[in-house]
Image (cartoon, coloured by chain):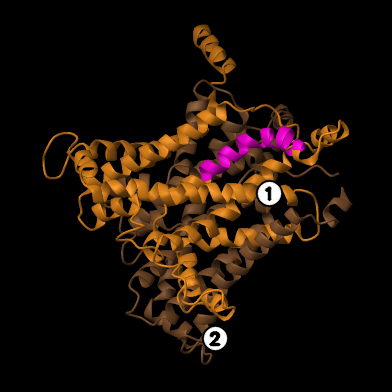
Amino acid sequence: MTATASWHHRLAERGVDRRLWLLLPATIFVLLLFVYPFLYGLSLSFQPLNGGGLLANYEKFFGDAYQRDTIVTTLKIALPAALLNVLAAVPIAFRMRGRFRGKRLLTTLLVVPITLGTVLTAQGLLNYLGPTGWFNRVLLSLHLIEDPVRLTNNYWGVFFSLVITGFPFAFLLVLSYLSGIDPTLERAAATLGASRAQRFRRITLPLLAPGLATTFLLTFVLAFSVFPSAVLVGNPAGSTRVISLAAYQAAYEQYDYAYASAIAMIMGAVELVVVVIVLLWRSRLYTGSTGGKG
Amino acid sequence: MSNRSIRATPTAWFIWAAVVFFFVNLAGVVGSVLVSSFGQKWFDTWVPSGFTTQWYGDAWREFGLLQVISVTLLASGLVVALSVLVGAPAAYVLARQNFPGKRLVYLTFLLPILMPPITYGIPLATVLYKFGFAGHLSGVVLANLVPSVPFVILTMTPFIEQVDPRIESAARMLGANTRAVFLKILAPLLVPGLLASAILVLVRTVGMFELTFLTAGPDSQTLVVALYYSMSAAGIRAQQSVDAMAVMYTAMMLVLLVVALRFVNPTQLVARVKEEPPE
């Protein structure tokens, strides 16, 4: 009896006590609905539908240029879109971090595109940027262009849809990171004679950089899984045939779940490579306190 | 500090111009859908030739929107209830306690948010089909729980950290058992956090396309999936009735958003709250 009591006591000292049971539902849930399907998909991807070796599905993907190129296509859309969203968010957030009238309204307005979702954005872009849409009409009546610019059903349609949904997200994140930096640090630098450019480059930017890396990652993940807009405003047979589309077609048009799982695994791996590169770069940055309350 | 913002430098002008340009185009995107949904015929002119509300009735009947919207609300409601029930206790433990393997547990809970939905959605849909869940409402709910539970954990944790643990200890000293501590002490204090995470999960689930798309059957489509199908089958139905459906979807999202913003700070939709220090 005393043995078990001290055993309980020692576990409790390390934080293992009955309260941990509260974790149980969430753990079961994540194991059943996330870890198990993932492992199932992984093992399924090594069991090709039409026979062949263990890696037949992967060989099929990388052997076929039409499939293999989806990786490059996806990265070509996702990387510039994520980069633009983050880089554009920095100066705008920097200017808006103070208090001013209408800030709440502005941030509220910026949340709207996040809730629109890709499907509605696609529909709007088709109407607005199409050959007879308002955008082309304005440019035509200003005599800036002779013929309507083609901005939908190609690369740019998808790119714009990613900017519309991704930029507000990036902006709000950067703004919250910037608000976490203690403004007195910058004022101290100003007292010591640092110019505005120096203050930004030597004080704000190094403190902000880890946050920027995180923001980039989250926007990249959003952009990387672009699916509805690639079909609706893109050119799904050619320039915007992204990897998620290839996975979808394998699963729901050819009913080859093994091959689809293999593509999903490749997709996850490619994404992971980018994430690891950014995280490695991030780990070399200053990650201490930003001086604020955050 | 204040006269800096009044004296506008060229960079400031450029930045404000970029913001205005973004919003003008955003208004164009949303506005063109709105105008088109009320228009009679719209080819090659600035505005439609006449205005009508018939498309809303058409869309309502053609797409069976009553059923679609009730499925959307039912699925989202179930996802919200289940994810809060599962996520909130886990958030409590993760916020309060250190235990061996905590980092691993935390990482596993966060992974579903960090991965693109399609990556785990396809294996998940395969498993759900195997066990006969997919194609029904249950499959849609189960699939949508995967990102929602971690999201509840993530948004609840800071709220729980704000509650002083001494309040709990005091209640225990006065003889309250665990159940009483939860129901009488923690639950009332955590109402704002619970509301915030519930409403955020609601907004995300109504807007979630990929997972619902992969697991929904013909009679378990949510509004956003039905919208996608009607768009990708363009040409069969009038463009305007698709637009009308898109407007209804937006209206629903906006209502949710207005409700959400009563409880949540906008920056909290994407990150933890960091109220700026008053200057």
Q: Is residue B132 magenta?
A: no
Q: Position of residue B270 (x, y in %)?
A: 60, 48
- Numbered-mark total: 2
Dot 1 crowding, Cα within 10 Å, few <14, some 14–19, many 20+:
some
The residue tagged 1 is: A91
Q: Main secondary structure of the magenta part?
A: helix
Residue for point 68% across, 33% down = A207
Position of residue B170 in the picture relative to residue A255 (left or right): right
Magenta segment: does it hold A207? yes
For chain B, the rendered hue is brown
Q: Amino acid at mark 1?
A: Pro
The amino acid type, in three-letter code, at marker 2 is: Val
In the image, the segment drawn in magenta is A198-218
Q: Is residue B240 rendered to the left or right of residue A64? A: right
Q: Secondary structure at mark 2?
A: loop
Residue A35 placement (x, y as % from top left): 37, 36
Disc nearest the viewer among 1 and 2: 1
**Mark 1 vs mark 2: same chain?**
no
Q: Quadrant of residue A253?
A: bottom left
Asked whether residue B163 appears in the rendered view, the answer is no
Residue matched to label 2: B47
The colour with which the image depicts chain A is orange
Question: Label 2 neighbourhood size at 10 Å, few (<14), some (14-19), many (20+)?
Answer: some
- Is residue B67 positioned above or below B18 on the image? below
Residue at screen point 69% across, 39% down: B185
